[in-house]
Amino acid sequence: MAVEVKVTSVLQKITGSKVVAGEGGTVGELLANLDGRYPGFNDQIMQNGALHRFVNIYLNDEDIRYLDQLNTRLKDGDTISILPALAGG
């Protein structure tokens, strides 16, 4: 599955671009594909094999935490956005 992946500046340092193409039948497979192409990618968003709690991933503007998380199915043309959670005061 060809999927467009949008990343923030922290991940842009690894990918070299704010938008990259990735492949996978699920979000987890997509992340594995990106980590294979951009070593260290998953180190920035995963912790102990799970999505870091301060990282949000959206599939076509829907938070995957409310879908099937890393098992969320993807289809050609989907857009994934990977964003760190923001905190402030």
Image (tube, helix red, strand yellow):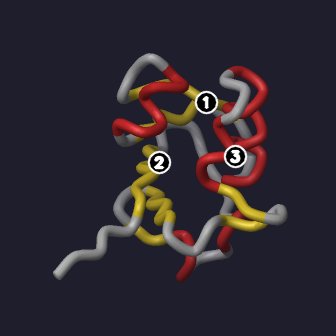
Image quarter hosting the C terminus: bottom left
Which dot marks residue 87? none
Residue designated by label 2: 80
Q: Secondary structure at mark 2?
A: strand
**Nearest to viewer (mark 3 / mark 2):** 3
Category of crowding for the residue at label 3, using alpha-carbon neighbours closer than 10 angstroms: few (below 14), some (14–19), many (at least 20): few
Q: Position of residue 87 (x, y in %)?
A: 29, 75
The residue located at (38%, 68%) in the rendering is 85
The residue type indicated by label 1 comes to Gly
- 61 relative position to 49: left or right: left
The residue at 41%/59% (across/down) is 84
Residue 50 point in image, percent of width and height: 75, 67
Q: Earlier in the sequence, mark 3 or mark 2?
A: 3
**Which quadrant: the N terminus?**
top right
Residue 22: numbered disc:
1
User: Mark 3 and mark 2: span between their CA atoms?
Assistant: 18 Å
In the image, residue 84 above or below residue 23? below
Mark 1 or mark 3: whose residue is earlier in sequence: 1
The three-letter amino acid code for the residue at tag 2 is: Ile
Residue at (55, 70) in percent of width and height = 64
CB atoms at circles 1 and 3 under 8 Å apart?
Answer: no
Residue corresponding to mark 3: 43
Distance CA(mark 2)–CA(mark 1): 9 Å
Kindly check if marks 2 and 1 are in contact, taking CB atoms under 8 A apart as contact.
Answer: yes
Instruction: Determine the secondary structure under disc 3.
Output: helix
Label located before the other in sequence (2 or 1): 1
As drawn, which residue projects farthest toward the right?
49
Image location (x, y in percent) of residue 9: 35, 36
